[in-house]
Structure formats: C-alpha cells, structure tokens
Image (spheres, helix red, strand yellow):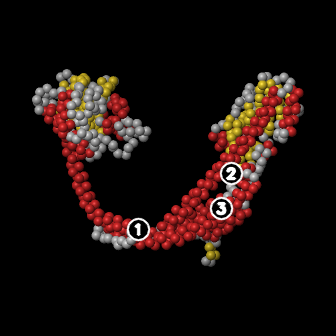
C-alpha cells in the first residue's frame, strides 16, 4: 500500500497510525470512557504484523525456534488462564444478577398473592384495612378488585375490572394494553380477588436497588415461549426499562448482561402463561456491591491493584525467561548442527558418516542414536529388497491361486453355475469349486478358512486338493456327509489346532433335480423358489477343529427358475456408518429384485450393494459368491 508523503516523510503511515490509536485508546481507558474494543483491534493488528514478518523471514535457526517455544509455553497458558477466570467471572456474575432479580420478583409475587388471598377470605368491612396495611408497608402503587358478593375496589375510583374469559388462579406478569403488570388472581368459592401492580420504572428500580438497568420484554415477545422468546426478548425492550448501568470501578469492570426468567401472559388470552426473561445490564462491581458491604468492596479493589502488580512481575519474568532460554540454546544448537551435517551426508548415500559425541546428556544420546541409525540404514536397505522379493512371490502365489478356482462350469443340462472371489489381500482364504464327480453327479463346494493371507490360502489349496481327490477316485457311492467327515479328519490330522474352516458341500443329481448337501458351520445358503426364499439349515460344525465329528445331510429340489446363492461372511458382515451389518436378509432382498437376471449380473448387483453399504476405506474380508440356477 502506498501512503501519501511529503519529501522523505510518509503521512499517516501504518506505524504512525498505530501509535496514534494506541495513545487514544490509553486516554479512553484511563478516563473510563470505553476503549476496550479499540484495544482488542490494536492487539489483533499487532499480532497480524508480527505474523507477516515471521512468515517473510522464516525462523530457520533452532535457537530462535526455542525462544519462540519458551514464549508460548509461558505466555499462552497464562493468557488462557486469565481469559478463563474473566469469562467464568462474567458468567457467574451474569447468573447471580439474574438470580437476584428472579428472587426479588418471586418475593414480590408471593407478597401480592398473599394479600389477594387475604382480600378474598376477609369480610367486606376488613378489606380496606388490608389494603391500607399494604400501602403502609411500602407496597408499590396497585389496584385491587374483589367480586362475588359485595364488590370491593381499591382505590374507590379505580377502573380495574376482572380479566376477560375464564381465567384460573394466576400470579405473574401479564400484558394489558401492551403494558406489563404484576397480577395476582385468586378464587375462593364465588369470591374472586384481583390485584394489579403496574411494572413502572420506579418498581423496577426498587426491585434490586443499585444493581443496574432492568427491562421487561414488550408484549410481542411476551406472548410466545421457548428459546425464541429469549432471542427476541433481548432485542425488544420498549417498555418499563429502568435504572442505569453503574459506572465501572476499574479497567476490567466490563458491562454484564443477565437474564432473569419470569412467567408472562396476555390479559385478553386466559391462561396463556409462557416462559420469558427480564433483561439485566450491570457490572461485576455492582453485583458485588449489592451482595457485600463497602469494606469488602474496598478489599476487592485492593485485589485489583495486586493483579496489576502481578502483571508487571509477569512481564519481568518473560524478559528473564528469554535471557535464560537464549543461554541454554547455545548448548543445543551445536549438537543440532552436527546432526544436520550428518543427515546431509546420509542423504547423499554416505552411510559411513559418524558425528562426534561428547558428554552423557540427552543430546549426546541423540548423537549416539544417530550413529546407530546410520549403521542400521544399510541393513534396512537389504531388508527392503528382501521385502520386495517376498511381495513378488506373493504375487506369484496369487496368480497360482487364481488358477485353482474353476474357470468354467461343468457341462450340465438342468443347472447353470457361476462363482467369483474377490480377495481382501493378494491371496484369499475363501474357497469355491464345482466339477463333475466320479459318479456323474455335480459337486458344489464353498468354504471360508479362518484367518487371512498365505496360511489361509495354503489351507484353502489343501481343501481343494482333498475334495477333488475324494470325488474323482471312483471308489463307490459318495455322499455329502461322508465326504465332509473325511475332509474334517484329514484337516485335523494335517493342520494345527487353531486352523479350521466353515464348509458347504452339495451333490446335485440331474436326473432327480435334487441337491443333497451338508453345511459344516457355514453361513446358510439362500434358496429362492418363485416369489419365496429360505435359508438352508446348518447340519454340522466346522471342519478341522475336532477329530471325530458326525455330519448330517439334507436334500432340496432345484427346479427350473430356482436359484441357490452360497456366500461367505465377506458379503454379509460389512458395516455402514451406524455399525449395522449388511446381513443375509439384505442379501436376499437384492437377489430377489434381480432373480430373473443372468448369474453374472446378479453377482455384480450384490457386490455393488455391499460396497455401497460398506463405509470402511478398504475391503476387510474376502468376498465370495456362488450362484446356481435351475434351467428347463
């Protein structure tokens, strides 16, 4: 920004403007005429200038950074502590001011309610004495009316009438002709007693004398309730605003706004009571002046002087901290410089570089750690190369496993089959297979090995090998239950105890169009017939965990159009943002909507629905599906 100048002097440059505003703000603060907001603006301006200079000249040296760190460690907590106490004091004072006003209003309401009840129960001859006692006791001006028998009115020429409509007993603030009144309406049999006290400026000023400015909301804000009343009530005080904000006793004696809850109603709307607020504007010194005697207030003012003295001592402490911090940093920057040179040398590939180390302090340990790191980097490079070799071998294993899955379904006249597997890692622990057994039946298998990675993939390959060997030797009739039982014994004998798998296996006979199956602890497959679906039963425990388990088998028909869907928990267990599983029922809903589509399209729709449901950033488990459809 270019500032106007005369010769070599700039007119009203930013530094001159800042100084002028700072002097003006100091005068305003000393005179007690405000200036707090100007002080905040000046502090923000100074912080912005310092930030721009720091950004233009980056703090490169560690010594300078440590000095800045000392400042933040010392000053920022103190500033936050001071701000906390100021905000807490403001909040407590605001609440206490509201409490005092609320208590005074409740006391005033209880007084006129008691007097209204006395008028309602008194004989006519005693009523004038009751109101005279109220007047003599200093009760603010009011009007009274008693009906139901001999009518009593005070003053005698008052125009007070009972409120329109069917009012019940009420004590609180009412708005009549847009003006606030304190009303007490009491019924005793057929007798009704009414006292109206206008909420004038004098009444509000004497509610809590010396507290500050009090205001009643206008009638528009008083006829509604809820949080909206508070928001609108603060902005709408056109009537009965009394008192003035007391002068501040010191620089920190800021104005305080409080709210006192009251109940208000409309004169023309019977029983229309609603929650509302009175607005209070005061200061901390005024609140303390109402609560405590003058001697304690003088002591509090003395505490303010002590606060100023402590602030001055705090400034001296900051200067001393900078001096001590600068001295201590000289012992740190040398070690940091050596480490900087060492990292530069290591970055150029010189792993033999070592830095000199002296002493037994933490900086010396840092130097020794650096030298140790340099010695380990070469070893790390070797480990990285080995890891790359293992990754290459895993990629080969993934390719081999992909070849183990069936690439085409066996020839069949009455069913069509399709299976897919999407591993969570490069290799999968899920297993699916379909082929023609030795006796001519179609074998269908799907399993889920416990765990993930290479070990699960190896167990999956073992299961496939065992199953294919059993079903291809032609040694006689085979059944799902016997086949799964034999698989269980072989896995238990050849694997560790913690290795097991859930397994679904079925044999489909094309002549009878029936599927005989055994479900060894696997998720129940979905069978769809027309517009209905069911989940097939689990007929045994997992394979590979126990040596001598028996397995049952079940039989279901697979007619034209019937659909069998087998799946692993990678399909049903993904969770949404609320922690809900996708679940078997949602899987059934998706398949039912697309049951007439081709198997590959059904698979695509299911995987799309699962991925849309899943909110995790990566696939948590292997996802495997096998579709079997009966055809004519």
In the figure, residue 174 lies in which quadrant? top right
Residue underneath mark 3: 307
Number of other residues with Cα within 10 Å of mark 3, as a class: few under 14, some 14 to 19, many 20 or more: few
The answer to whether residue 271 is visible is yes
**In the displayed structure, would residue 333 be above or below residue 127?**
below
Question: Label 1, on which residue?
Answer: 361
Task: Please name the residue shown 65% across and 52% down the image.
Answer: 90
Work out whether residue 545 or residue 506 is closer to the camera in this orientation and state it: 545
Residue placed most toward the observer, 526 or 456: 456
Label 1 to label 3, Cα distance in Å? 40 Å
Q: Quadrant of the C terminus?
A: top left
Q: Position of residue 613 (x, y in %)?
A: 38, 38
Quadrant in which residue 576 is drawn: top left
SS for callout 2? strand
Q: Position of residue 370 (x, y in %)?
A: 34, 66
Q: In the displayed image of the protein, which residue is found farthest to the bottom?
A: 7
Q: Nearer the viewer, residue 1 or 610?
A: 610
Estimate the x, y position of residue 529 in percent, counting from the top left. 30, 24
Determine the residue positioned at 34% across, 67% down.
368
Question: Distance between the Cα atoms at labels 2 and 1?
Answer: 54 Å
Residue receiving disc 2: 256
Is label 3 in contact with label 2 (beta carbons under 8 Å)? Answer: no
Up-down: is 398 above or below 513?
below
């Amino acid at each position: 920004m270019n500032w106007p100048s005369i010769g070599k002097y700039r007119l009203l440059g930013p530094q001159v403007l800042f100084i002028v505003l700072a002097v003006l703000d100091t005068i305003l603060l000393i005179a007690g005429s405000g200036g707090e907001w100007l002080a905040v603006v000046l502090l923000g301006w100074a912080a912005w200038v310092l930030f721009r200079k720091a950004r233009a000249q980056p703090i490169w040296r560690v010594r300078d950074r440590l000095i800045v760190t000392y400042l933040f460690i010392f000053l920022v907590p103190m500033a936050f502590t001071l701000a906390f106490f100021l905000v807490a004091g403001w909040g407590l004072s605001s609440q206490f001011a509201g409490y005092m006003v609320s208590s005074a209003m409740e006391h005033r309401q209880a007084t006129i309610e008691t007097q209204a009840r006395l008028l309602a129960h008194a004989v006519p001859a005693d009523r004038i004495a009751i109101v005279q006692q109220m007047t003599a006791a200093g009760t603010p001006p009011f009007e009274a009316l008693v009906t139901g028998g001999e009518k009593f009115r005070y003053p005698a020429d008052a125009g007070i009438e009972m409120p329109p409509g069917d009012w019940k007993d009420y004590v609180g603030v009412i708005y009549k002709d847009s003006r606030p009144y304190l009303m007490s309406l009491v019924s005793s049999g057929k007798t009704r007693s009414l006292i109206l006290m206008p909420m004038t400026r004098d009444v509000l000023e004497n509610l809590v004398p010396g507290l500050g400015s009090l205001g009643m909301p206008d009638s528009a804000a008083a006829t509604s309730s809820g949080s909206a009343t508070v928001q609108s009530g603060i902005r709408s005080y056109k009537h009965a605003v009394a008192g003035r904000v007391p002068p501040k006793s010191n620089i920190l004696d800021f104005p305080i706004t409080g709210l006192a809850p009251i109940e208000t109603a409309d004169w023309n709307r019977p029983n229309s009571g609603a929650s509302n607020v009175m607005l209070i504007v005061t200061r901390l010194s005024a609140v303390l002046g109402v609560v405590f005697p003058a001697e304690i207030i003088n002591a509090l003012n003395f505490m303010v002087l002590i606060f100023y003295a402590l602030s001055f001592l705090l400034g001296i402490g900051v200067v001393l901290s900078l001096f001590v911090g600068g001295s201590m940093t000289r012992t740190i920057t040398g070690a940091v410089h050596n480490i900087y040179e060492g990292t530069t040398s290591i970055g150029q590939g010189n792993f033999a570089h070592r830095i000199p180390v002296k002493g037994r302090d933490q900086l010396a340990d840092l130097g020794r750690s650096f030298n140790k790191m340099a010695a380990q980097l070469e070893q790390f490079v070797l480990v990285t190369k080995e890891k790359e070799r293992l990754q290459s071998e895993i990629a080969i294993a993934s390719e081999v496993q992909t070849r183990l899955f069936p690439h085409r379904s066996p020839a069949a006249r009455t069913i069509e089959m399709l299976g897919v597997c999407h591993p969570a890692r490069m290799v999968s622990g899920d297993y699916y297979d379909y082929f023609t057994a030795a006796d001519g039946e179609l074998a269908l298998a799907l399993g889920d090995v416990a765990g993930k990675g290479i070990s699960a993939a190896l167990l999956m390959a073992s299961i496939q090998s065992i199953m294919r060997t059993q079903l291809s030797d032609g040694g006689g009739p085979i059944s799902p239950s016997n086949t799964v039982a034999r698989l269980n014994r072989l896995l238990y004998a050849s694997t560790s105890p913690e290795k097991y798998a859930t397994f679904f296996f079925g044999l489909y006979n094309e002549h009878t169009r029936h599927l005989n199956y055994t479900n060894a602890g696997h998720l129940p497959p979905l069978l769809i017939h027309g517009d209905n679906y069911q989940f097939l039963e689990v007929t045994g425990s997992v394979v590979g965990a126990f040596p001598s388990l028996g397995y049952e088998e079940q039989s279901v028909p697979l007619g034209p159009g019937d659909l069998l869907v087998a799946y692993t928990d990678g399909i049903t267990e993904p969770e949404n943002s609320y922690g809900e599983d996708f679940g078997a029922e949602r899987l059934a809903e998706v398949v039912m909507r697309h049951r007439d589509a081709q198997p590959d399209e059904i698979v695509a729709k299911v995987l799309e629905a699962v991925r849309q449901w899943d909110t995790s950033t990566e696939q948590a488990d292997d996802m495997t599906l096998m579709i079997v459809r009966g055809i004519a």
